[in-house]
Amino acid sequence: MSFNYLVLFLTTVSLVSGYQNYTIITRLGNVNGLVIPTTEGDIFRFTAIPFGKAPVGSQRFLKPQAYGSWNRTFDATKLGPACMQSYTGAIIYDNNLSEDCLHLNIYVPYNISKDVRRSVMVYIHGGGYMTGSGISYDGSRIASHGNVIVVTINYRLGMFGFPSLQNSEVVENVGLWDQILALKWIKDNIDDYGGDASNITIFGESAGGFAVNFLMLIPRNKGLFHRAIIQSGTANALVALKKSSVVGRLIGKNSGCNDQDQSMFLRCLRYLDAGFIVNKTDEYSANLGIDILSEIVFTPVLDGDLLQRTPMELIKDKSSKEYQFFESIDLIVGNCDMEGAYVVPLGKAFETKFSFNISDGIPKQFLCDGLIPRIVQNYYENSSSISDLLCQEYTSEDKTAQSLYVVHFLTDFVFIAPAVDLLQSHASSKSSSTYQFIFSEDLRLFYPNLPSWFHGAGHATELIFLFDARNMTVTNFTLSAKQTSFSKQLIEYWTNFAKTGNPNGPNKADWLPYRSGTESYKQLSIRNMTNGNHYRKDYVKLWNTIDAYKFPTSAGANMQSRIGFSLVVFLYAFKLFT
């Protein structure tokens, strides 16, 4: 079926002086967007396009339903709402929140033409499955400099997206179902905006990275996307998924719903005020204590449908249909070098209990008597041997070194070790490409009060160079000339990969592919764009050895678990010298 592309320029100025309306004809109906001038050319922006019906009332906690078409010209000039979430720490336009939030935003560079088929990049935002929105990430910079179409999406968050109710009348993981419905919409409709539906890359950061990885492990998604970039969060991390969870039920009870009759309990939850549920979730989160550093309240769960086995199992089972789909996707996986920087703002809450001032440093006591025991209790069956080993490997007598060890501990556990494990699994594929990056540009926009002992790139820092930082922070930040040049280099890597599966291109410092033997990675900072090998090799081996013991995926590994943890210590020591 062919469609005519507009053609209609209006002189009406909307939202911001100088922006013109622009209407296109699509298979779903006419859509009116804005033409926004940038230093690299015009961007055609279409915002708050609905891909799903409002999941409210009886549809709360169920799969999303496709929105369908519209009769009148759809107004895509205004910024839509974010999905329900806490205001705390979230940057949201006009504090506009709604359950009716299943919208997406499209950024098209230069022109819209049926004769141009641009690669498409779909961004899935992070925020710990609890906060964030597609509209917070203006895709204009990537679209214009990379000559690609960028789409950002919303999905349900917190209890609305990941109910954790263990109720047969509830669909778990509806936040993932939202993402899948958005991808189906993009696959079916993006050609109306000049996009190439056969060349779609999904990318995401933090919980968005988790989501990208989960989507790669769901075979029914075949054809919805072809490449993936996972930034700062892989689904095989222990924090990314719970096998089961009743957090939603606990919050429901705290909200005044009686859970003696599950049908009545669910009816009560479905008609509670959405803001009230958010407030009760905030109350629950406020009582996490030190677990706030290593636990996500609402996560995907094993539901017997989308997710039947853990990612840790699936990436080791090369005969599974999940692995075969996973390995078919071209992949970049990367991290900031000091992801665990969030321990600084969050760690202030524990200064009195552990008798320290975080400006001076973080002591061994906080790590070995506080953080490690809770992580080992939550994820490693409270093994004192594992606690002792981790404390030994991440301590120093030097105050500055000890402080940085705490940051590295969280970085390695949550991010680096799982990322390398995933890369190793994917690199064995002969049908797709694999790349790793380590981002190390120390820009503290998200962490303005870091102490003098800290150095490195904290979690999410790379986003400042990919998107417009003014939409993500309360400060009116503008990149310097050097930072702008660096930003363009990153965008070229990202968009080259989206177009071809290879980040390299003319006049680019070569980015070597990741191979099991060499484990090459690209260092990304203004002063260092070199390739390295075996990033944090010894610490990755430490965590992978522990995980192989605690989460056996073969008969041999089960035998290892029966022999005991002394073997783990031996294996780790042996691996350090091999």
Image (cartoon, rainbow, N blue to C red):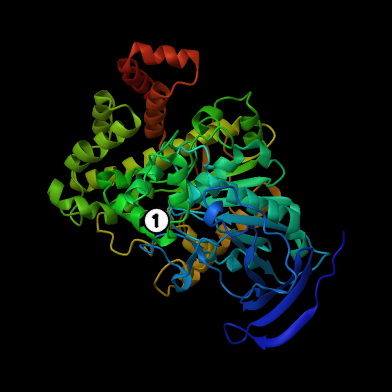
For the N terminus, the quadrant is bottom right
Name the residue nearer the viewer: 144 or 523: 144
On screen, residue 27 versus residue 531, left or right, reads: right
Residue at coordinates 70% horizontally, 49% vertically from top-left? 500
Q: Is residue 247 above or below residue 25?
A: above
On screen, residue 406 versus residue 51, left or right, reads: left
On screen, residue 475 versus residue 173, left or right, reads: left
**x and y, in percent, of residue 61 in the image:** 52, 48
Task: Label 1: state its secondary structure.
Answer: helix
**x and y, in percent, of residue 148 in the image:** 68, 61
Residue 543: which quarter of the image?
top left
Residue at coordinates 35% horizontally, 62% vertically from top-left? 88
Name the residue nearer the viewer: 105 or 261: 261
Circle 1 is placed at which residue position?
277
Residue at coordinates 23% horizontally, 43% vertically from top-left? 402
- Badge 1 crowding class, 10 Å Cα cut-off, few under 14, some 14 to 19, many 20 or more, is many
Name the residue nearer the viewer: 335 or 222: 222
Residue at coordinates 38% horizontally, 54% vertically from top-left? 458
Residue 331: which quarter of the image?
top right
**x and y, in percent, of residue 397 in the image:** 17, 40
Whether residue 231 can be seen here: no
* Amino acid type at mark 1: Ile
Q: Which residue sits furthest right? A: 1
Q: Is residue 57 above or below residue 570?
A: below
